[in-house]
């Protein structure tokens, strides 16, 4: 049977359209803005993560949908060089670093809009015009930088976090290098980064955190900055997610850095860290901002046996049948080879002791826990009550033998290898009660469809609010609206427009209002010319012509 996931790498299209309600009734009080981002397709290296950012904005009151490519200096440079250079010359430039793709997540800092990507500095854009404003932190402000004449590599987390009390944002700076001459292992340092929205970034070195896979997300409580190592195994000998030999580690290392040590006087110096470890790998996490003493309540969306750094190839064979993978999946990731729980952990911030742990899992439904949404208003951030988790489910035609074998010996397996799905597990949306770690309500999408990038939308009149979620069909994309605490009743409204078809998306965001940069009274800028220096002047004339034009555009 065909499946929507097999069509998400079809060429991306830009849109500027009004949605039509095709089912149900659009909530009269719904307002604000939903933003979603993902990598534009196709990509040059046949790996779905490698496309430039494709941003979508839905005005929920007007039901207007706009999708367009993100344009930054890095991406403008890549586009210009791709047109001007022979493939071999471009490949040589890309061999030691890469442009920032800005394709993973939207974030806010007050009314300001930030976009992020894997292992790059956050980008600020104008929320209305989508014009590039600045990278956050000049290259020279970061301790760890991969030198390059065009794309100096500043590796950070794809998910920074805004601090409720301190009026700042936190993220990190890392640099994973091959361990000695190894072609399978990497390691690297960790620096905590703080930014107040206007001045230089502040950094602190965390020598007690030894990274071997990387950091994808940073979260914060009233007393701690918390970083977790992602379940994503990079290998120096693997190119664009191919030729993997090592599974990612089957646990999550948690690092807690006390804010009391992150002082202005200690900037640039080493600070202590507390380490905790919990079973099962993970992609995403968040914490209740308010603590009970030194106890931190941390929530982890686990990703058992889901390898997002494996790129499907034409030579891959479906587990059990030996059939080739379906057309359209080249460059996509494999289906997960286990069910995926959500965990809640109470960790002593001073010692790292895991005082309590509970998990939420239905092995018959909860597969591919990629994206969630939550109420981002201050009271809910202080102590969250609900989480809206979207699951892709499991298409058995995307379970491939090579990845099943890679995770055969996972020590925390929920589903035995001989019980892997032979029938589709549908995509679903679940509201999780975080107090009891039980299901509050849930909805399964029709067979062959996939829901992703949910957005919690508050009710301005004080009601329970809604969840807006993109639902992919094989031939179209819909925006479905649910009552947030009554998912089981199905969507209250479905909207689309003929021809609307979105490629793969990653993360989403709700903004109650959009203020253009001119209304925000911020003049924060880090000149791109300062970031790349003068090394590019020694490159070929074709390269110099492209770089000169980009620098003039972003002067």
Image: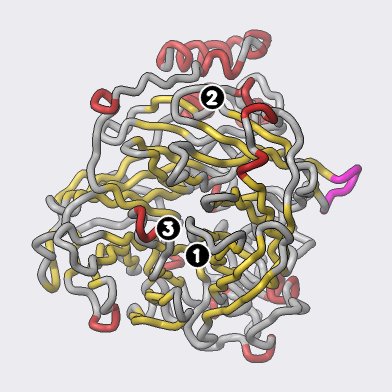
- In this view, the residue farthest toward the bottom is 419
Mark 2 or 3: in front is 3
Distance CA(mark 1)–CA(mark 3): 24 Å
Identify which residue is drawn at 68% across, 90% down: 418
Q: Earlier in the sequence, mark 2 or mark 1?
A: 2
Image mark count: 3
Which residue lies most toward the right here? 181
Residue highlighted by disc 3: 382
Q: CA distance from mark 2 to mark 1?
A: 34 Å
Disc ID at residue 370: 1
Was residue 262 drawn as part of the magenta stretch in this picture? Answer: no
In the image shown, does 174 or 317 lie closer to the viewer? 174
**Which numbered marker is on residue 359?**
none
Of the two numbered discs 1 and 3 in the rendering, the one whose residue sits closer to the viewer:
3
- Between the residue at mark 2 and the residue at mark 3, the CA separation in whole angstroms equals 47 Å
Q: Which residues are magenta?
A: 179-184
Tell which circle, 1 or 3, labels the residue nearer the N-terminal end: 1
Element at badge 1? strand
Quarter of the figure with the C terminus: top left
Residue 145 can be seen in this image: no
As drawn, 430 above or below 39: below
Binning the other alpha carbons within 10 Å of mark 2 as few (below 14), some (14 to 19) or many (20 upward) gives: many
The location of residue 360, given as percent across then percent down, is: 52, 80
Compared across the picture, whether 263 is left or right of 332 comes to: right
Can you give x and y, in whole percent of width and height, for residue 179 in the image? 86, 45
Asked if residue 292 can be seen in this view, the reply is yes
Q: Secondary structure at mark 2?
A: helix
Question: Given the current orientation, which residue lies at the most extreme front position?
Answer: 293
């Amino acid at each position: 049977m065909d499946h929507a996931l097999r069509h998400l790498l079809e060429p991306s299209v830009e849109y500027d359209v009004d949605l039509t309600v095709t089912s149900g009734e659009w909530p009269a009080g719904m307002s604000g803005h939903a933003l979603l981002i993902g990598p534009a397709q196709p990509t040059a290296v046949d790996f779905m993560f490698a496309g430039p950012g494709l941003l979508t904005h839905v005005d929920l009151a007007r039901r207007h949908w706009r999708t367009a490519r993100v344009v930054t200096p890095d991406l403008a440079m890549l586009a210009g060089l791709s047109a001007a250079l022979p493939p071999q010359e471009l490949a040589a430039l890309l061999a030691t670093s890469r442009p920032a793709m800005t394709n993973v997540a939207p974030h806010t800092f007050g009314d300001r809009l930030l976009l992020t990507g894997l292992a790059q500095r956050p980008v600020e854009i104008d929320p209305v015009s989508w014009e590039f404003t600045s990278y956050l932190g000049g290259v020279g402000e970061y301790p760890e930088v991969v030198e390059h004449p065009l794309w100096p590599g500043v590796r950070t987390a794809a998910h920074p976090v805004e601090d409720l009390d301190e009026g700042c944002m936190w993220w990190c700076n890392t640099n994973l290098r091959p361990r000695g001459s190894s072609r399978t292992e990497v390691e690297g340092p960790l620096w905590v980064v703080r930014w107040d929205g206007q001045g230089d970034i502040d950094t602190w070195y965390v020598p007690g955190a030894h990274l071997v896979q990387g950091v994808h997300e940073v979260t914060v409580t009233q007393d701690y900055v918390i970083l977790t190592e992602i379940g994503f195994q990079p290998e120096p000998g693997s190119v664009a997610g191919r030729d993997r030999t090592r599974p990612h580690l089957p646990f999550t290392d948690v690092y807690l850095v006390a804010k009391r040590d992150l002082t202005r006087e200690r900037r640039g110096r080493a600070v202590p860290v507390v380490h905790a470890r919990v079973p099962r790998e993970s992609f995403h996490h968040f914490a209740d901002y308010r603590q009970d003493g030194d106890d931190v309540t941390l929530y982890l969306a686990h990703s058992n046996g889901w390898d997002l750094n494996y790129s499907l190839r034409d030579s891959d064979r479906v587990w059990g049948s030996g059939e080739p993978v379906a057309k359209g999946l080249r460059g996509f990731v494999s289906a997960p080879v286990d069910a995926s729980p959500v965990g809640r952990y109470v960790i002593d911030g001073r010692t790292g002791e895991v005082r309590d742990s509970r998990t939420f899992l239905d092995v018959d439904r909860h597969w591919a826990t990629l994206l969630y949404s939550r109420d981002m208003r201050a009271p809910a951030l202080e102590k969250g009550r609900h989480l809206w988790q979207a699951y892709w489910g499991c298409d058995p035609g995307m379970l491939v033998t090579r990845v099943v074998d890679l995770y055969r010996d996972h020590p925390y397996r929920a589903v035995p290898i001989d019980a892997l799905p032979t029938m589709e597990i549908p995509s679903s949306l679940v509201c999780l009660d975080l107090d009891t770690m039980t299901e509050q309500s849930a909805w399964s999408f029709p067979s062959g469809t996939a829901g992703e990038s949910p957005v919690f939308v508050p009710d301005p009149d004080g009601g329970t609010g809604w969840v807006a979620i993109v639902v992919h069909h094989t031939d179209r994309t819909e925006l479905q609206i649910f009552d947030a605490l009554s998912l089981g009743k199905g969507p209250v409204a479905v909207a689309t427009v003929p021809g609307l078809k979105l490629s793969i998306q990653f993360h989403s965001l709700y903004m109650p209002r959009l203020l253009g940069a001119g209304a925000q009274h911020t003049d924060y800028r880090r000149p791109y010319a300062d970031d790349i220096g003068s090394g590019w002047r020694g490159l070929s004339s074709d390269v110099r012509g492209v770089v000169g034009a980009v620098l003039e555009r972003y002067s």
